[in-house]
Image (cartoon, grey):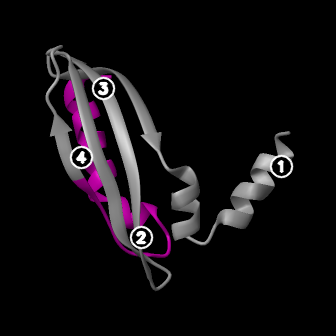
Amino acid sequence: MQASCQRAELRRHFADGPAQAPGADRFEPVGRVHETADPEVVIFEFSYVGSANGGPFTVPCVFVTRVRDGVIVESRDYGDHVGMARAFGRLDNLATALAADS
């Protein structure tokens, strides 16, 4: 996949946040980028902030990426999936899915 296509997909993913989260009234990433000693490594520390089903939420996340020539070549995402399930009223679904995997 070409870099411009990847960038467009990422922009669309974050711009369409509320559309991808049924029940969300508001959904946006809010945070900062950390400087690192390695020029290829970028750390994004942020929270998804918004409201869903009539209640506010803040769900913390960290993305660690490696970028070469303007292209993300590696990415690891760390987020509070239980917090996200709680925010969207899906704790029962998460518990059922986890129990089925055991």
Q: Where does the magenta region start and end?
A: 1-30
Q: Residue at x 45, y 38 (%)?
A: 78
Magenta-span inclusion, residue 9:
yes
Placement of 97 over or under 39, stated as above or below: below
Q: Residue at x 38, y 46 (%)?
A: 61
The residues bearing labels 4 and 3 have C-alpha atoms spaced at a distance of: 16 Å
Q: Which residue is tagged 4?
A: 11
Tag 3, which secondary structure?
Answer: strand
Task: Compare marks 4 and 1 and give the one earlier in the sequence.
Answer: 4
Mark 2 burial class by Cα count in 10 Å: few <14, some 14-19, many 20+: some
SS for dot 4? helix
Q: What quarter of the picture does the N terminus occupy? A: top left
Name which of mark 2 and mark 1 comes first in the sequence: 2
Q: Residue at x 73, y 65 (%)?
A: 92
Amino acid at circle 1 = Ala
Distance between the Cα atoms at labels 2 and 1? 25 Å
First in residue order: circle 1 vs circle 3: 3
Residue pointed to by mark 2: 57
From mark 2 to mark 4, how far is it between C-alphas? 22 Å
Q: Amino acid at mark 3?
A: Thr
Residues tagged 2 and 1 counted as in contact (Cβ below 8 A): no
Q: Nearer the viewer, residue 65 or 11?
A: 65
User: Which mark lies nearer to you, 2 or 4?
Assistant: 2
Spatial CA distance of label 2 from label 3 is: 25 Å
